[in-house]
Amino acid sequence: MNTLDFRRDGWLVLILAALAIAGFFLPNWVRYILQTSLAGGLVALAVMIQMRAGLVSFGQGLYYCAGAYIAGIAASKWGIRDVTVLIPMTIIVTALFGGVVGLLLSRYREIFFAMLSMALSMILYGVLVKAAWLGSTDGFNVPAPTYFGFAPKASMRAEYSYVFVATIVVITAFVVARYLAISAGAMLNTVAQNEVRLEYLGASPRRVVHVVYVVAAAISGIGGALTAFTTRHIDPELANWTTSGSFVFVALLAGRGSVIAPIIGYFVLEMVKTYALGWAPNAWQLILGAVMLFIILVLPNGVSSLFSRRSK
């Protein structure tokens, strides 16, 4: 399914909200994995919407890491700990950064776009590795955030953190569904299929690519900030090409037909990885690869095809 039905995806976002609420009935360790998956799933979602324009970003870790470090530096170095400031700050900075970088990347397509995005991410990785004041390769811890000026007790921090992360993810998924339903999002498929035809319609393919790149940068920045709040520790590995590659793989497995498929797919793969490490510590990659191969064979159009079948 190449197009999104906003009404259908509106219901899917409600399903995502129900799954988030269900997290309270899960064991603490499963809820933690779910919470990190919600944050990381946003980055996979950002990769997915770029794929709709025929763009594969192997450097989305650039904004994932930037979002985490923006929130982490503001909280630990500047004493700004309230989420009402940290999240808007992250969105603004990553969007502005993406706007500047997007002026360059919007000129390129296919492998050139992929390699340039990865190169920029690795530049940030190299800078952070050399930044001793940010902990170099070890990174640094992030203090617990406050919520609208309220600092929960230590025994309740996990619950407050989960509610906040789940709420932000559901809102972001809804906004993305709305974006893909309007003309700006609908033109993404045309960019991938026939840019000349889009130009005949009076639209600029380069501008469409630039806009989706900025949107993806802001979404990834939110995911990075939420990861910083969840794990309470960040390091340069967030910008490494292997991290970006995992987002691309999740987006491919999830498919392009649903805004919640990348989030669900991220959680499924994290659970498989967790159990595979427990069952076969020396062969967990083999198990993970077998599961991924099974998904590809059974669902060649991705996990989102399950939702599109039910909507027919």
Image (spheres, helix red, strand yellow):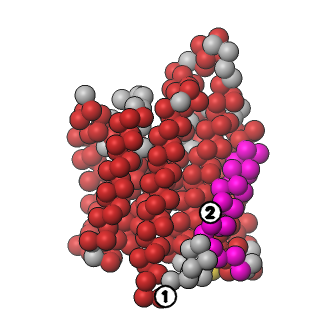
Q: Quadrant of residue 146?
A: bottom right
Residue span colored magenta? 79-101
Q: Nearer the viewer, residue 290 or 156?
A: 156
Mark 2 and mark 1: Cα distance apart in space: 21 Å
Percent across and percent down for residue 177 are 47, 40
Q: Which mark is residue 243?
A: none
Q: Which residue is mark 1?
A: 153
205 lies above or below 159? above
262 sits to left or right of 197: left
Residue of label 2? 87
* Residue 170: image location, x then y, percent: 44, 54
Q: Residue furthest bottom?
A: 154
User: Disc 2, disc 1: CB below 8 Å?
Assistant: no
Helix, strand or loop at label 2? It is helix
The amino acid marked with disc number 1 is Lys
Q: Is residue 93 one of those drawn in magenta? A: yes
Residue 133: x, y in percent? Answer: 75, 80
Picture coordinates of residue 118 (x, y %)? Answer: 62, 50
Q: Is residue 43 above or below residue 298?
A: below
Q: What residue sits 46% from the left and 75% below the top?
A: 160
Q: Residues within 10 Å of mark 2 (few under 14, many from 20)?
A: some
**Amino acid at the residue labelled 2:** Ile
Q: Is residue 84 above or below residue 217?
A: below
Q: Is residue 157 visible?
A: yes
Q: Quadrant of the C terminus?
A: top left
> Which residue: 63% across, 13% down?
201
Q: Is residue 281 visible?
A: no
Within the image, what quadrant is residue 225 found in?
A: bottom right
